[in-house]
Structures are given as C-alpha cells and as structure tokens.
C-alpha cells in the first residue's frame, strides 16, 4: 500500500483530469498535499460526470416545481411524481455513451442496469424501459457493429432482468460516427409513503455493501466519461463495466424486500465512482461521515489496491445504511437471495470520510468537499455563437425548386426507406415489450408507450424525444421543440404531460461554441417546460461527446438534449391509438401548415442542404392543439391521433394506414409548396380521424380552441391517392417501410 499512501504530485493530478488550480484547491481544503488514493477520490468526484462542474450553473435555472412533484431534481437518485392513489412514479434517463463506443454490448447493457438501479434503490419496482440511440452512417461497417452490439446488450439485459422495453428512438448521422449516444430510461412504481432516501443518518449505524463482488472493471469510468474519444481510447477498456442481469434481478428482489422493513436508513446504488461516490454523497446528504474498511469488501480479484476498490464501477452493488441491531435481518434477506451483504463500515460524526485497509488509514477526506454544492468546483464557461449560425438562419427555401406531384412520389419512396424514417422493427423485435406481469404494456400503436398501473384504472404514457438536427440548427428552438414533441406524443395518447427527465449530450464544454449550444438548449428547455407545466425531475449531463482528430481538432456530435417524459392517464379506457380504424373515416389536420421545409429529413438527406433554420414552431399554438386533442379524446369524437414529425405529413399518414392495411385519399393545399405540405416538419400539427357521426362534435371542440383545421380527405381500403394521383397501395409501402433497416444491416 506504499504507492497508495504516497504523496500525490501535480503530474499525477493532471493525468487524472484535474487542473493545477483544482490541485491547489484540494491542498487548501485538506491543509496538506493529498496522497495518491485521496487524489484518486477527488479526481473522480470532481470529474464532470460526477460534479457537473461545467453545467450546474445553468441546470439550476431549470423549473423544478410542479403539481405532481414528490422528489425534485438533484434531491435523490431519481425524480418522483405523484400519480394518485398513494402511488408515485420514479423515472430517470442517463447516458452510457463512452463505454458503448468501445464495447457496445457491455456498455449498453450496464447502462440499462445502472438506470434500473437508480429506480429500485428508491424502493420503486421498475415497470418499463426506453432508450434513445444515435449512430453514424449506416453504410459504415463500424456503425453496424456498434448498432448490433448496443441493441443486443440492451435486449439481453432488459429481457433477462424482466422489465419490458416499451419505446425509444433511433437516429443516424455522420456526426455520431466515432461517438455514438446510448441513453437509457427506466420507469418504476412505488408507494409514496415508502420512498427510500440516498441519505446516511444515525451515528453508529452500520454501513453495508450488498450485491455482487467488486472487481477491476469500470475503474476510472467516471473520468473516462469526461474526456474525448481518441484512437487510444481502446486502451481504456478497463473503464467499461461488465453487467450481470440475473444478479441484478436478485438484487432488485432483495432490495425491495429490505425496503419493506423498517431497517433501512438510506440506500444508494454504486454507479459512477463506485464506493467513493456512494459513501461521500450519502454522508454529505445526511451531514455525517463514515469509517469504511476496504479489506471487508467482497472482491472478485486478489491484491486490489485501495484506490481500485474505491473507484471500481463493478455493477449490481448497493451501499445501505441500516439501523444498528438490524444486522441479522439485513444479512438474512440477502443470504436468502444468495447475495453478498457485508458490513464494511459505520456512520460517524463530523465530515471526515476515513478509508482503512488492513488496519491502516489509506485516505481521509472531508466528504462534503467532494460533492456538488460542497467543495466541488463550479465553472462559468465563456460561450459564443458559432460562425455558421447566422448563415444558416439566412438560408432561403426559395433556392429549392418545388417538386411536381410525380417527383413527390419519388421523394416519398426515398424517405420511407431512409433509416431515420423507416420502421425500427429490426431493433424492437430483439426487445421483449411484454416480459413480466406487474404492469402490462398495451402494445397498441400510439405516439407514446402506454403502460397500465396494476390495481388501478390509471396508465402511464412514456416517451423519449429529440430531433438533434433541429437543436444543431437552433439549440433554443430545437430543444423547446423536443419538449413540445414529447408532450405532443403524450397528448395524442390521451394522457396529460406531467414531468420530464433529460439526458444532455454535448461536445467539449471548453469549446465556446459548444457551450453556447448548451446554454441556449437549457434556455429553450426551461421555456418549454414552464409552458407545458412539465418540471424537470433530474437527469444526466454528458459532455465530451466528440472524436479527436489527428490534426488536433475534434468533431462534436449534434447537441442532443434527449427528453424523457411521463404523462398520466386517469382512465386507460381513454387511451387513443394512431391507426386508421375503418374505410371512410374523415381525416383532419389540426394546426397551421406553412411552406416550411427547414431542417427536415427531406431537406437534409434528399436535397442535401445541411444548414437551415429550425422548423416553424409556435409554442402557444402547440399548447392549444394538444389541449384540443386531449379534449376530443375525452369526448370520444375521434378514432385516431398522430402527430406530424420526422418525414412530414406523408409519413404520418402512412404510419396511420399501415397497422390495419388501410390507405388514404387526400388533397394538398395549393397555397403551400407541395414538398412542405407533404414532407415539411413544421411543428404543432396533429392528424386525427373521425366518423361522419363524430364530425360535428370534433369541429365544436376545434372551434373552442380556435385552432386551424383542414379536412384532408378520407381513409380508403388500401389505395393511396394524393391530388387524384395514384401513389400505389399501403401493402407495397409497408413492405419497404418494414424491411429497409434490416436490408441495410444485412447488406
């Protein structure tokens, strides 16, 4: 242990990602130069991944108060909203980008495991999972390797763990070629009077590590997540964790059994920074300290150094503080589930975390100085508008010729087989959406996934959304659109948007242009969340999503602030699906159509224009359209509802037609350019259908909200016609739509 307790140097600190100023600050806090192990502790806890030192200033501006909030952002491992009847919904989204870039299977799998632990460590049983995935060009062999590994990792872990994967999104762009994004969301249900806090209390109470043994996987994972991906990143494979879903299932059941007792004082999962993070954060939250004996920690490998034990991110582990005298109860529960439950320490007075190995004090640090809001640094980074931004805003759509109706059909064919538009069947068929019996997913085609809450008439509507191309074009408007689209998807099911969690994926915060994107994204999110009354319950910031180039430059991914949203459906009988039901139904378009082709998939992938303003968006109009649709659903005057999003109106109509093999006959608007009407992605529009008997009631609701409406046409038996031009049959389009991604993967 000599090396572990040797005095640390500035060179070592910098190798660990600390600056010289931070090194000086640590020395000032401690009143001495830290030893090597202590320096390791500060390096992970003061990393961006753990401390949010480059983002917290702006995160604090996000709205955190709402009608349903039980646990706010930053208070616990996940946010909780009240869904009534003594029940709460715990949910959170996090990234596992860097590990997935190196080892896609384990990187994605452990991302799923980690986010589920955040949920059940609070006493909630996970009932649903979602994910948001971004990759480079699909014609690149590495992209296919990454996609295959990530999807299999998510599927294997989720299916084995026994929690259904009910929704998600998948997007391809060259900017993600080296650095993919893998964001995982988990949702759970708990009784509101049984919430477990990640807080250590009660001097003299024992501290337990429970679950799996500790190994060398994941060491310095938090620091690894706080730097660029380079050609040498493969050397960091030990920073990638290894997961075991079967162990996690046992840990879930044991943890929830323990939670049902009165023995638990506090509990936190071991994710980033492992024992270091859980001991320091729990101690700081409770205003106490701990003595921890590292030689008592169950190990998978012999001769692990103190810093390795402290920083290991081995999966399926928890830190639990229990009432003194309840040791036998705790150990009995975990023994029943064949899991480790080992007393490794005790809660102490003061703020000094002390770590021992074989009777020797190897590290002593003030715990509150390690965490956000304590001693961890907070930076106010400079930011500046990107050089290309003004040019993009000045782009004129008149430079793009308006296609003929015949050319429009060819465009439609290209869009339907585009991997960003085509069915993601190849992905979701690898997931089990119905595993488990606690809370059944309806599996009805709808804009958001709808999961029943067992024992009630309620349901939850769940979605993840972000069009990163919009955010790249205009971070403030693009992020507001991400929140609005999530709310729109929730509203189209008949549920009321309740709250969001976010996963903020950006490049290097030291780049003023990247930080400008971040700041404006936060501002857009704040505005939209306040408008829709969907406060932020928490989430994750993931910086350094970029790839270092040989010339010393870096290519950042699109700014991607992924929004996870939960909506509450008081009575699931009002669940609205998106599919056409019968021939002859009338098709209405709610909301304003404009000649906007900005930032659309059509403009980017077919026309080839990569820089333009964000799509047309009016947040007040958005709110009215959503309220109108929810009202129409409650009054029972519509048969289907589907938002207009990626690919535009044509794709939305096709998605409504395909589930039941029906078609549509519509007329376009002569006053709006044809490509904008069919393929433009102007926001705040929803397609609904109704029978002739329902028409008057629907029109009354539309008049109440004073929103634009157009009768597009009607549902057909299977033929598709636009402006009296034959566009083929639904079955033909569906064959292309369903198989395009798989054919690309197999090609």
Image: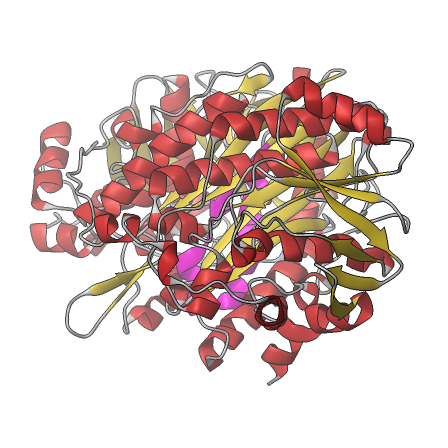
| Residue 691 in the image: above or below residue 18 | above
- Which residue does the image show at 42% across and 52% down from the upper left? 598
| Corner quadrant of residue 603 | bottom left
Q: Nearer the viewer, residue 726 or 253?
A: 726
| Residue 219 in the image: above or below residue 638 | below
Quadrant, the C terminus: bottom right
| Residue 66 seen in render | yes
Q: Report x, y in % for residue 14.
A: 14, 53
Q: Nearer the viewer, residue 228 or 248?
A: 228
Q: Report x, y in % for residue 335.
A: 69, 42
* Main SS of residues in magenta: helix
**Residue interval drawn in magenta:** 91-118
| Corner quadrant of residue 738 | bottom right
Q: Report x, y in % for residue 720.
A: 77, 63
**Residue 104 covered by magenta stretch:** yes
- Which residue does the image show at 33% across and 54% down from the upper left? 396
Q: Is 634 left, or right, of 263 in this rendering? A: right
| Residue 678 in the image: above or below residue 270 | below
């Amino acid at each position: 242990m000599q090396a572990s307790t040797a005095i640390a140097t500035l060179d070592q600190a910098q190798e660990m990602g600390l600056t010289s100023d931070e090194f000086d600050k640590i020395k000032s806090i401690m009143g001495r130069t830290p030893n090597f192990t202590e320096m390791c502790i500060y390096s992970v806890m003061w990393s961006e991944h753990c401390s949010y030192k480059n983002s917290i200033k702006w995160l604090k501006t996000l709205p955190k108060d709402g009608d349903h909030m039980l646990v706010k952002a930053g208070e616990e491992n996940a946010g909780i909203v009240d869904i009534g009847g003594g029940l709460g919904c715990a949910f959170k989204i996090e990234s596992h980008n860097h590990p997935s870039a190196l080892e896609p299977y384990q990187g994605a799998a452990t991302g799923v495991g980690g986010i589920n632990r955040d949920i059940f460590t609070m006493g909630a049983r996970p009932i649903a999972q979602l994910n948001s995935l971004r990759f480079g060009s699909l014609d690149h062999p590495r992209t296919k390797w990454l996609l295959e590994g990530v999807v299999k990792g998510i599927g294997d872990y989720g299916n084995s763990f026994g929690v259904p994967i009910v929704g998600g999104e998948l997007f391809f762009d060259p900017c993600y070629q080296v650095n993919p994004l893998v964001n995982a969301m988990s949702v759970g249900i708990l009784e509101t009077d049984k919430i477990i806090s990640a807080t250590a209390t009660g001097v003299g109470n024992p501290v337990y590590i429970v679950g799996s043994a500790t190994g060398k996987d994941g060491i310095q994972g938090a620091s690894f997540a706080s730097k660029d991906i380079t050609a040498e990143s493969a050397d960091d494979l030990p920073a990638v964790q290894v997961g075991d879903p079967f162990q996690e299932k046992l840990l879930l059941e044991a943890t929830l059994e323990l939670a049902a007792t009165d023995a638990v004082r506090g509990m936190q999962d071991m994710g980033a920074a492992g024992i270091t993070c859980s001991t320091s954060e729990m101690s700081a939250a409770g205003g106490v300290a701990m003595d921890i004996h590292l030689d008592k920690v169950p190990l998978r490998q012999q001769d692990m150094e103190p810093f390795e034990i402290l920083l290991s991110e081995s999966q399926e582990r928890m830190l639990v503080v229990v009432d003194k005298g309840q040791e036998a109860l705790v150990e009995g529960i975990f023994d029943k589930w064949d899991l480790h439950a080992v007393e490794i320490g005790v809660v102490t007075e003061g703020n000094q975390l002390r770590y021992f190995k074989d009777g020797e004090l190897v590290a002593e640090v003030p715990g509150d100085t390690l965490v956000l809001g304590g001693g961890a640094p907070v930076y106010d980074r400079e930011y500046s508008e990107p050089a290309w931004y003004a040019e993009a805003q000045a782009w004129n759509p008149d430079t793009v010729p308006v296609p003929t109706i015949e050319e429009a059909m060819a465009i439609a064919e290209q869009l339907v087989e585009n991997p960003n538009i085509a069915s993601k069947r190849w992905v979701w068929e690898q997931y089990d959406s119905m595993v488990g019996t606690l809370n059944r997913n309806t599996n009805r085609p709808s804009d958001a996934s709808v999961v029943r809450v067992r024992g009630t008439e309620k349901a939850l509507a769940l979605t993840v959304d972000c069009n990163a191309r919009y955010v790249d074009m205009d971070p403030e408007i693009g992020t507001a659109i991400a929140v609005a689209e999530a709310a729109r998807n929730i509203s189209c099911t008949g549920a009321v948007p309740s709250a969001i969690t976010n996963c903020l994926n950006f490049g290097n915060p030291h780049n003023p242009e990247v930080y400008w994107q971040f700041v404006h994204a936060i501002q857009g999110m704040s505005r939209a969340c306040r408008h829709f009354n969907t406060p932020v319950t928490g989430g994750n910031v993931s910086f350094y999503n970029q790839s270092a180039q040989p010339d010393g430059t870096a290519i950042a991914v699109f700014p991607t602030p992924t929004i996870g949203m939960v909506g509450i459906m008081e009575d699931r009988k009002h669940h609205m699906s998106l599919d056409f039901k019968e021939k002859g139904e009338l098709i209405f378009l709610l909301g304003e159509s404009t000649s906007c082709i900005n930032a659309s998939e059509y403009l980017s992938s077919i026309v080839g224009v990569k820089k333009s303003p964000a799509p047309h968006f009016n947040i007040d109009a958005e709110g009215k359209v959503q309220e109108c649709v929810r009202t129409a659903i409650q009054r029972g005057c519509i048969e289907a509802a589907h938002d207009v999003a990626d690919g535009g109106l044509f794709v939305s109509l096709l998605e409504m037609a395909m589930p039941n093999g029906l078609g549509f006959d519509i007329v376009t608007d002569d006053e709006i350019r044809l490509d904008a009407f069919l393929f433009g992605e102007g926001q705040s529009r929803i397609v609904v259908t109704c029978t002739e008997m329902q028409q008057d009631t629907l029109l009354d609701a539309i008049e109440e909200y004073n929103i634009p409406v157009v009768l597009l046409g009607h549902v057909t038996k299977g033929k598709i016609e636009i402006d009296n031009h034959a566009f083929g049959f639904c079955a033909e389009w569906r064959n292309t739509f369903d198989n395009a991604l798989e054919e690309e993967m197999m090609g």
